[in-house]
Structures are given as C-alpha cells and as structure tokens.
Image (cartoon, grey):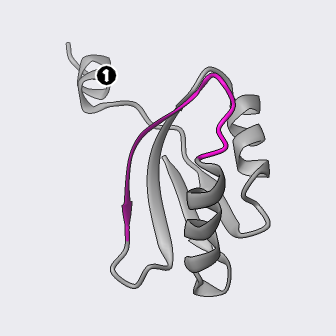
Amino acid sequence: MVIERFRNGDAAPVYARFRERGRLAPEGVKYITSWVDSTFQVCFQVMEADSRSLLDEWIANWDDLVDFEVIPVVDSATAQARFSP
C-alpha cells in the first residue's frame, strides 16, 4: 500500500504530470487500484512490485510532488491462511 500525500495539499501538478507522461513506473511495478480522499490531498494506491528497489525507482519519478509512505501488505486470504489452524 502506498500512501501519497500531495505536497502543499495540491494534487493539480501530480495529475498534470500523469496526463503528460503517464504513471512513470518501471517494468516490474504494476498499478492495481487507488483511491483519493475527498479533499484531494491524499492518494491510497495498491501497487505490486518485483522488488522494493523498483518501487523506489517509481517513487523517485514523483517525489518532487508527493511525500510517500510505503506499507507492505498481503491480501485477506493470505492473512487468513497464515492464522488458520
């Protein structure tokens, strides 16, 4: 899970770059889905990456506009299997 906080609470530059250049993700980084809060200051993205270094490459393409927090997650089925007897 990637939590993006738009610098200065301003999403406009992020969406402008996305329109002009796309997601800017290297091969091995896959966008799954995302949600943006109703004030357009924070984006919650589910990304899949072959490695953290590839995810860091993607982050580097945006870190002038966004502050990132990365939280490794697993899906619910994986979590349930981990704690099943």
Residue 40 lies in quadrant: bottom left
> Residue at horizontal 79%, vertical 67%?
64
Residue ranking furthest to the top: 85
- Few, some or many C-alpha atoms within 10 Å of disc 1 (few <14, some 14-19, many ≥20)? few
Is residue 34 within the magenta segment?
A: yes
Instruction: Provide the secondary structure element on which disc 1 rests.
Output: helix
In the figure, residue 56 lies in which quadrant?
Answer: top right
Residue at far front of view? 20
Kind of residue at disc 1: Thr
Residues drawn in magenta: 23-36
Magenta span has 28?
Answer: yes
Q: Residue at x 77, y 39 (%)?
A: 57
Query: Which residue is depicted at the point 44% across and 58% down?
Result: 44
Decide if residue 21 is on the left or right side of residue 43: right
Which of these two is toward me, 76 or 60? 60
Residue 9 falls in which quadrant of the image? bottom right
* Residue at 50 percent of width and 79 percent of height: 41
Q: How many marks?
A: 1
Quadrant including the C terminus: top left
Q: Residue 21 at what x, y percent from top left? A: 66, 51
In the rendered image, which residue does mark 1 sit on? 78
Residue 28 vs residue 75: left or right?
A: right
Q: x, y (%) of residue 59?
A: 71, 49
For residue 1, above or below residue 50 = below
In the shown orientation, is residue 66 left or right of residue 38?
A: right
Does residue 23 appear left or right of residue 38 in this picture?
right
